[in-house]
């Protein structure tokens, strides 16, 4: 039920394998190193309920740091390695971290926030030293590898990716349960996917995001080997499945699209027969993309819908999905309600804001206004992630779009996800974002911004081709009136699109 138990039984079993470097961290090393760091936290004065933060690339010690904080009963915040100094300083300060850990490869941004984060009492640098930072390796080596006497479970306090505004820290209650007590996620993983202890789990996404971090730790609780990609590459992912006989994996739809766009000869080159379960989440998956993945990999593609907030969990297996194409599942945790702007519940088939009741409580740390805004207007305690969708007669949820991205054109609601799903399948499109822009007559007009596969192809001819392609498949009012081209779209490595950054360029001010 935790790395210490696995280490006692199979100490030399790989706990982490880094995909590109090949570096292996055994369960004995994971257990002993996390115990040493936990003792360092105690020696620095941290007690259960206090806070540490770390900003690391997908590093061999990433999960060591997370386990050290978790087994110390601390709150821990894993921070995106792509943030700029102002963003990093905000999160480290907002989460009230007293220890901050980073790496030599990120020293430039890590050292830039020292004066703006005075609450931090200890700063540690992995793979080197920098002004204001002590050597992680030297500091940890000074402590014994046995567990701390008051070992108990902590909790992650992660920040939303900020795709619709400033990141929000999601702070769950801290229960300080014994380390071997299974949490809700582990129970769900065992119930849905039944992974044996000899499973091999492939994690192709940045570990600082909620799903990769939590699922890697859940699979390590059962003794699985976790293969971590330093960064996602579609062909390398297929090669890793063959090389390590991967049994379980988790993806986002943009990864599916990139793998599907590989040449047929490349896709058929690798033996994927070991893969028993491919999980995906984080963003809506176009129906045609998922159909193609199931045709390629077989009925092993599982989907869930949840958020960092942990207020609900929906799931759909491959067979139910084929009978309800486009759904993100039915609730296993919490009860789903679809409500209008006044909070009144809507009937099946009607579009509205998706709320959860009867799920775990959460708050946005230090922001009671954002916490209140996530609750239903009638004060029933229902909470939302900000998505729009509808339920069918069988209780399956279908997501339409983010509430903040809905376009109102001539009084008609347009959900840009529909056009994005269509355009993402065009062979000349590498990435796409659709949103509303000012229009004197209609209020808003539908705009697409496209990253073309071939830079030289961008221009009026491709614009006309994409608009016509979309109009062949969707009602005209849902299709872009114009298309702009960019070398790259601002997309989070987890697959989420920073659409707000694009959209704001077309509006006189962020206020609409």
Image (tube, rainbow, N blue to C red):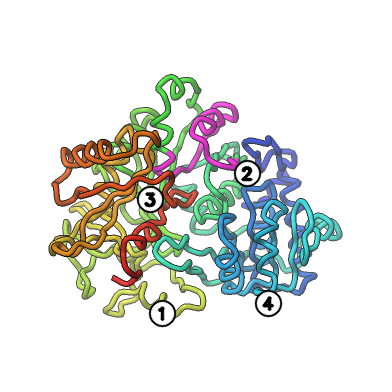
Residue 351 at x, y percent in the picture: 20, 60
Asked where in the image residue 380 lies, by quadrant, the reply is: bottom left
Towards the viewer: 459 or 267: 459
Per the model, the C-alpha gap separating discs 4 and 2 is 37 Å
Q: Where in the figure is residue 179, as x and y percent of width and height?
A: 64, 60
- Image quadrant holding the C terminus, namely bottom left
The residues bearing labels 3 and 1 have C-alpha atoms spaced at a distance of 26 Å
Q: Which residues are magenta?
A: 228-255
Q: Secondary structure at mark 1?
A: helix
| 362 w.r.t. 434: above or below | below
In the picture, the disc for residue 119 is 4
Task: Tell us which disc is closer to us: 1 or 2.
Answer: 1
The percent coordinates of residue 430 (x first, y second) are 38, 39
Q: Nearer the viewer, mark 4 or mark 2?
A: 4
Residue at 34% over, 38% down: 458
- The reply, left or right, for residue 319 in relation to residue 362 is left
Secondary structure of the residue carrying tag 2 is: loop
Residue 397 visible in the snapshot? no
Cα distance in 3D space between marks 2 and 3: 29 Å
Which residue matches tag 3? Answer: 283
């Amino acid at each position: 039920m935790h790395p210490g138990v696995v280490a006692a039984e199979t100490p030399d079993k790989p706990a982490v394998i880094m995909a590109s470097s090949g570096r292996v961290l055994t369960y004995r090393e994971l257990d002993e190193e996390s115990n040493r760091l936990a003792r360092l936290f105690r020696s620095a004065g941290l007690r259960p309920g206090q806070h540490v933060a770390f900003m690391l690339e997908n590093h061999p010690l990433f999960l060591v740091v997370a386990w050290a904080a978790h087994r110390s009963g601390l709150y821990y915040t894993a921070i995106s390695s792509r943030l700029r100094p102002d963003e990093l300083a905000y999160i480290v300060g907002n989460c009230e971290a007293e220890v901050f850990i980073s790496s030599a490869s990120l020293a430039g941004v890590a050292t830039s926030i020292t004066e703006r984060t005075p609450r931090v009492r200890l700063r540690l640098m992995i793979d080197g030293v920098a002004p204001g930072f002590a050597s992680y390796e030297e500091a940890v080596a000074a402590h014994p590898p046995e567990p701390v006497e008051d070992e108990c479970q902590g909790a992650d306090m992660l920040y939303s990716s900020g795709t619709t505004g400033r990141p929000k820290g999601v702070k769950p209650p801290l229960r300080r349960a014994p380390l071997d007590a299974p949490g809700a996620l582990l129970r769900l993983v065992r119930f849905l996917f039944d992974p044996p202890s000899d499973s091999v789990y492939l994690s192709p996404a940045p570990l600082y995001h909620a799903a990769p971090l939590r699922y890697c730790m859940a699979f390590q609780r059962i003794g699985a080997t976790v293969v971590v990609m330093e960064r996602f590459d579609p062909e390398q992912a297929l090669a890793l499945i063959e090389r390590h006989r991967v049994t379980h994996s988790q993806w986002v739809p943009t990864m599916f699209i990139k793998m599907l766009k590989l040449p047929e000869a490349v896709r058929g080159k690798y033996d994927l027969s070991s893969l028993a379960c491919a999980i995906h989440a984080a963003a809506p998956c176009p129906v045609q993309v998922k159909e193609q993945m199931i045709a390629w990999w077989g009925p092993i593609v599982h989907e869930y819908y949840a958020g960092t907030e942990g207020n609900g969990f929906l799931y759909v297996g491959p067979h139910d999905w084929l009978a309800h194409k486009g759904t993100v599942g039915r609730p296993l945790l919490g009860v789903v309600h679809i409500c209008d702007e006044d909070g009144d519940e809507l009937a099946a088939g009607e579009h509205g804001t998706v709320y959860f009741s009867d799920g775990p409580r959460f708050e946005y740390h230090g922001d009671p206004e954002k916490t209140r805004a996530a609750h239903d207007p009638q004060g029933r305690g229902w909470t939302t992630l900000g998505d729009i969708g509808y339920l069918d007669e069988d209780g399956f949820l279908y997501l339409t779009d983010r509430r903040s991205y809905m376009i109102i054109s001539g009084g008609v609601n347009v959900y840009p996800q529909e056009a994005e799903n269509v355009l993402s399948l065009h062979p000349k499109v590498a990435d796409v974002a659709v949103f509303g822009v000012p229009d004197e007559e209609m209020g808003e007009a539908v705009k697409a911004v496209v990253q073309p596969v071939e830079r030289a192809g961008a221009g009026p001819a491709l614009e006309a081709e994409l608009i016509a392609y979309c109009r062949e498949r969707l009602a005209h009012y849902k299709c872009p009136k114009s298309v702009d081209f960019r070398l790259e779209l601002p997309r989070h490595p987890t697959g989420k699109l920073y659409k707000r950054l694009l959209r704001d360029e077309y509006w006189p001010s962020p206020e609409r």
